[in-house]
Amino acid sequence: MDFTHKACLVGDGHRTPAPSVSTYTGVVSKETACIAFIYATLNGFEVFASDIQNVYLQAPYSQKYYIICGPEFGAENTGKYTIVKRSKYDTKSAGVDFHNHLRDCMRHLGFESCLADPDLWMCPAIRKDGAAYYGYLF
């Protein structure tokens, strides 16, 4: 991969009006994480770790954005308008767009948000011995 089709897009978020609702994506509280680790330890569950790194860039926009292609998009595309369909870091709605996308993905995988902490996700599961429990993800 030579990255010839990657581009840095700047949304001039500082020029847009402030949104009327919160646009930040939440994170699980440290108290919830501590309780989940204690719960796992007391019940003999394995704990796994992972990182979703650049998934932030995969969230679809809730607003419509376009760019005018420059020479970096090739001579045949220079000056053409292109619709941007995935999120970027610098728009004011990027955080809430990512959170909504992650919520939809988690529900598709069978997880539901915990009422006590909406950033803790749980899914019913069955242990090897047949006992029912909830798997947790945060």
Image (spheres, rainbow, N blue to C red):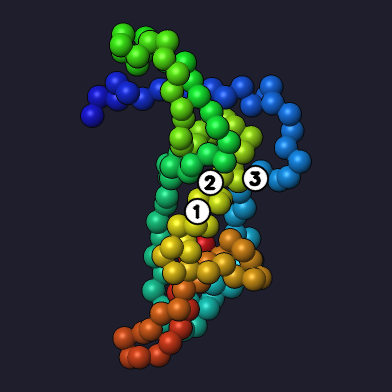
Q: Residue sitting at 73 percent across and 29 percent down?
A: 17
| Residue under label 3 | 24
Cα–Cα span, label 2 and label 1: 6 Å
Q: Assess disc 3: are there few (<14), some (14-19) or many (≥20) residues with their C-alpha within 10 Å of its C-alpha.
A: some
Whether 66 is drawn above or below 42: the answer is above
Q: Secondary structure at mark 2?
A: helix
Q: Which mark is residue 98?
A: 2
Foreground of the two, 107 or 8: 107
Q: Is residue 42 left or right of residue 16?
A: left
Q: Which mark is residue 102?
A: 1
Determine which quarter of the picture holds residue 4: top left
Q: Earlier in the sequence, mark 1 or mark 3?
A: 3
Residue 43, percent from left and from top: 46, 84
Q: Residue sitting at 38 percent across and 84 percent down?
A: 126
Residue 89, percent from left and from top: 53, 34
Cα–Cα span, label 3 and label 2: 9 Å
